[in-house]
Amino acid sequence: MAKPALITVTCPCCQAELHIDPATSAVIRHKAHEKPATFSDMEAAVNRFKTEADRREDAFKKSVADHKVHHDVLSKKFDEMLKLAKENPDEPPPKRDIDFD
């Protein structure tokens, strides 16, 4: 009985090469995709690392600043909604996200 040939498939996600046995539908052999070197020299890698560190630090500072103001924003929203509720006491409460289902 002739042995069926393996089917070669390239993974669309990781570009790995898979060799599949059609009879058992099992991966018989796997060859990982070899990625090319990202940096040609060490100085470029160090410069990129430093700029990424600066970017992360800026994002963290922005997050901290947003977090400090978050309480004030929520208080203002609550005060505005309370004012609207007092002006129109007969109006039904606004719909919540769960009410739309």
Image: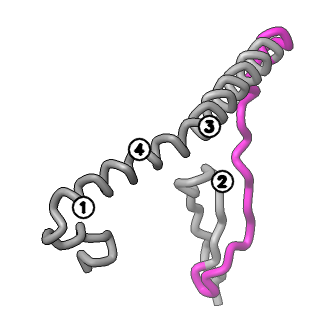
Q: Mark 1 or mark 2, which is nearer to you?
A: 1
Q: Is residue 86 left or right of residue 16?
A: left
The residue furthest top is 43
Secondary structure, mark 4, is helix
Q: Residues within 10 Å of mark 1 (few under 14, many from 20)?
A: some
Secondary structure, mark 3, is helix
Foreground of the two, 65 or 101: 65
The part of the chain drawn in magenta is 22-45
Foreground of the two, 53 or 74: 74
Q: Is residue 52 left or right of residue 87?
A: right
| Magenta stretch contains residue 23 | yes
What's the amino acid at mark 3?
Lys
Looking at the image, tell me whether mark 1 or mark 2 is earlier in sequence order: 2
| Magenta stretch contains residue 96 | no
Q: Mark 1 to mark 2: distance in Å?
A: 60 Å
Numbered badge on residue 33: none
Q: Mark 3 to mark 1: distance in Å?
A: 27 Å
Q: Mark 3 or mark 4, which is nearer to you?
A: 4
Quarter location, residue 58 = top right
Residue beneath disc 1: 85
Where 40 falls versus 62 (above or below)? Answer: above
Residue beneath disc 4: 76
Q: Determine the residue positioned at 64% across, 77% down.
A: 21
